[in-house]
Image (cartoon, grey):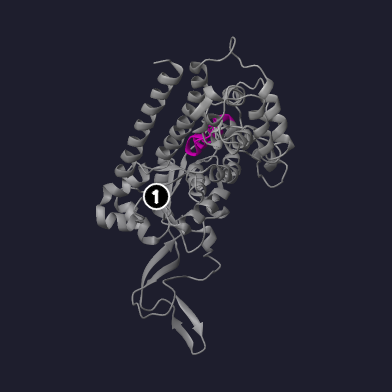
Amino acid sequence: MLSQGQRGIYDRFRGRLMWPIHSASSDVIGFGARRLHEDDDGPKYLNTPETPVYHKSEVLFGIELAKKEIAKRQQAVVVEGYTDVMACHLAGVETAVATCGTSFGEDHVRILRRLLMDQDEFRGEVVFTFDGDSAGQKAAVRAFTEDRKFVTQLFVAVEPSGLDPCDLWQTRGAEAVRELVARRVPLSEFVVKGILARYDLNVAEGRVAALRAAAPVVARTKDRSLAHAYAVSLSGWLGMEPAQVLEVVAQAAREGARGGRPEAKVVDTGRPAGAGSSGVTAAAPMAFGDRPKPDDRVLMVDREALKTALQFPALAGEAFDALAPAAFAHPAYVAVKTAVAAAGGAASTEGGSTWVARVLDVAANDAVRSVVTELAVEPLRCQGDPDQRYVDEQVGRICERLVQLQVVDLKSRLQRIDPTDSVQYNRVFGELIVLEQQRRQIHDQAIGGA
């Protein structure tokens, strides 16, 4: 309680509100103190310095009160401050403890493991209450680094408005504090969602970057069954295929096991979930030189539509021309559609060799010209010459796929929206209903023949 200065011994905690810090055996081993006067130029919080009996990295505030309940309930709630511990205990959350001016570390893990009987046959839980700001995110990441030192499952409880347990108890009462702990989410999920929040998930580039950043976190989850479940959830949050995400997570796990930097290579194909290709590659994103295979069933519709535009442009017409190049799912087909548009579009010609020659003249390079030549002579997958219904079906399938991709993106957004934000949730849900109706209409008209 006293410190030595240039003028002698002085009261270390003058002008401060003080809390005694106890050991697990209830002995007072130090003090924590908060300044009372705003004109005090000292730190907001001040603790006893390191002494032979007080080592802040080995102490949890409130442990003497919480230890029996922690052992009984198999739960520990780790909060950030002294008043948060007090508020939790007053609210009935009697397993609350706090660190004493330091980050949650390995020595704190040992204390809780001993109380929780943290073994395979005795599984409990540790709940961290972090602020929702950037500092809270960093604290969660630090806690995640301790995850593998527990058998116990780790959770995070964050109040949406950013209130800490003390403020929550003062403004909304004891029940709100209990609800905060009850709404806990797995630590891995909290960290992953914090990573995803840094990226624009409405564009393919953002989703790919987010997956690459989040995959190592999911891969580090110690419970393999939970890791699989988190990977599947991650696919929903991103609006990507589960098989794609699972492969990238597995790749990150292999990199981590080798001690390398777990950075997986992944390509977002832009296709809806379940559309076929995994989109995962061990190399760079797909280059144009990777020619699409004629028998690729996922790309069959794209290939048939392009063949009709080159061989029967009058049938393809304006409906085909209205498709954007990005509607096609392979870079080679995007390049061919771009060349068709540059040549004037399918509606501008009756066809024939001169039409194909025009497309070849404006093609970007020899690789594109090679694919144009191939598509211009390859038979269509129909009996005899195609009719208008056949061509409309191919274009309709591409349009349906585009709408389905938007549906998947909206469903992904719905999973990322805070459930308490009913206004935003209802707006996005309304958009989803409209798109689903549009998709069914396209399917019925172009494919069902309605």
Residue lying at 29% horizontally and 48% vertically, measured from the top left: 176
Residue 142 screen position, x and y as percent = 54, 53
430 in relation to 312, above or below: below
What is the quadrant of the N terminus in the image? bottom left
Give the extent of the magenta segment: 228-243
Q: In the structure shown, which secondary structural element does the residue marked by tag 1 occupy?
A: loop
111 in relation to 344, above or below: below
Q: Within the image, what quadrant is residue 363 found in?
A: top right
What is the quadrant of the C terminus in the image? top left
Amino acid bearing label 1? Val
Q: Is residue 235 magenta?
A: yes
Mark 1 highlights which residue? 158
Does residue 255 appear anywhere in the picture?
yes
Residue 145 screen position, x and y as percent = 58, 49
Taking the image as shown, residue 1 lies to the left or right of residue 170, namely right
Taking the image as shown, residue 165 lies to the left or right of residue 173, namely right
Q: Residue furthest bottom?
A: 7
